[in-house]
Amino acid sequence: MDERNFLSIKYLLAQIVILILIVSIPLHFYIKSELENNRFKDIIELKSYAEKVANKIYKFSNSDEKEFYFPRSNIFKGAIYDSSANEIFSLLKSKIELFALDILIKDDINYLQIRLKENVFNARTLVVSKNITYSKMIQNVLAILIVVSFLVFVLTFFIIKQSLEPYKKFNIYLENFIKDATHELKTPIGVILLNLDLLDNIYENNKMVKRSKSALKNMIVVYEDLEFFVRKNRVEHPKEHINISDFFKERIEFFMDLINSKNMRVEQNIQNDLYLNFSQLELSRIIDNTISNAIKYSKNGTKIELYLHEEQNNIVLKVLDEGKGIQNIDKIFDRYYRGDKISGGFGIGLSIVKNICDKNSVHVEVKSKLKVGSEFIFTFKKI
């Protein structure tokens, strides 16, 4: 998990915690109040039903009717008991013992008992019950949660949007600046390289000219990375039918001044006439960054091995060096990560390489041993 994903998860968790805190406090008081209101309402309804049943019992006792029908209800249940608390008749869902107080709550059921006057059944106690229902309260709680969550989301969205506005403007300004700067640098870099080539032809084996050319070519790789980075989402890079064998040799030749300036040896094993459908610009970023890093992180007088061959209908490109090795392989493709800050660069080269590989289904493998060297292996699908 990279740092950006980790920060996103932390931000999301923080938002969830804040939302829970904002919602839980008022909900706690609402639920407590709603439970009290429901209980009070149920007691009033139970008393009303109990009076209805008691009046029917009294009315039957003073009448000549021979059959008594205990009032039925889908909501309320009832039972009558004699003076010894023995059950005379019951519609209650479960058997219950008489209780000391007038009200009892048991198994999510409200019970109310009242004393009866003398009647023909010799009943002394009437118990009525009603199930406690939470459906309406749950609906209200869900409605409150939805409304509060929506309001918090909208509020958070506008706050974040407003707070990010200066950064967006700065990023646009920075991007435009880099774009303009790279455009302005292109011409002088080309002029300098042309003049250095002329000087190299005039003053053969001049070390100062060689060093200047190698330094400039190193700078060209960084410049081209920046240009690609700025334009990658705006410019299409169409694929071409490329002779990758010849292209690889051309890129190696480009770096020969840099290789010679460090007295390095190059061992090439390149199979001829291998073709690939690929963007030439994207392929140059893969090859240039890999060779440039191999040179940059290798000591003077060491060797670089470059291989290109066909393998099981794939094209495999390898770059091996005898450099210092990579301490943290898992991070080398992260943007702005630099294995060695002393060697310079912006830390975007290998990030660009990885993005291009992912985009084009190129498998990249890195092997490395500290103080021994590194090996980059790219496997292209031959189509």
Image (cartoon, rainbow, N blue to C red):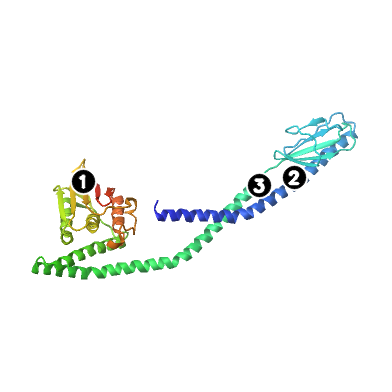
Q: Amino acid at mark 1?
A: Ile
Q: Between 237 and 28, which is closer to the camera in this rendering?
A: 28
Q: Secondary structure at mark 2?
A: helix
Q: Secondary structure at mark 3?
A: helix
Q: In the rendered image, which residue does mark 2 sit on? A: 42
Q: Secondary structure at mark 1?
A: strand
Q: Is residue 144 above or below residue 72?
A: below
The number of numbered badges drawn on the structure is 3
Q: Amino acid at mark 3?
A: Lys
Q: Earlier in the sequence, mark 2 or mark 1?
A: 2
Q: Between 250 and 260, which is closer to the camera in this rendering?
A: 260
Q: Residue placed farthest to the front in the image? A: 371
* Cα distance between the residues tagged 2 and 3: 14 Å
User: In the rendered image, is residue 149 in sight?
Assistant: no
Q: Residues within 10 Å of mark 2 (few under 14, many from 20)?
A: many
**Is 304 situated left or right of 98 in this image?**
left
- Residue 272 in percent (x, y) is at 13, 48
Q: Quadrant of the C terminus?
A: top left
- Residue 270 in percent (x, y) is at 15, 49
Q: In the rendered image, which residue does mark 3 sit on? A: 136
Q: Is residue 204 above or below residue 124?
A: below
Locate residue 225: give its quadrant.
Answer: bottom left
**Is 56 situated left or right of 173 in this image?**
right
* Marks 2 and 3 in Cβ contact (< 8 Å): no
Q: In the rendered image, which residue does mark 1 sit on? A: 315
Front tag of 2 and 1: 1
Q: Residues within 10 Å of mark 1 (few under 14, many from 20)?
A: many
Locate residue 42: give its quadrant.
Answer: top right
The residue shown at (50%, 63%) is: 159
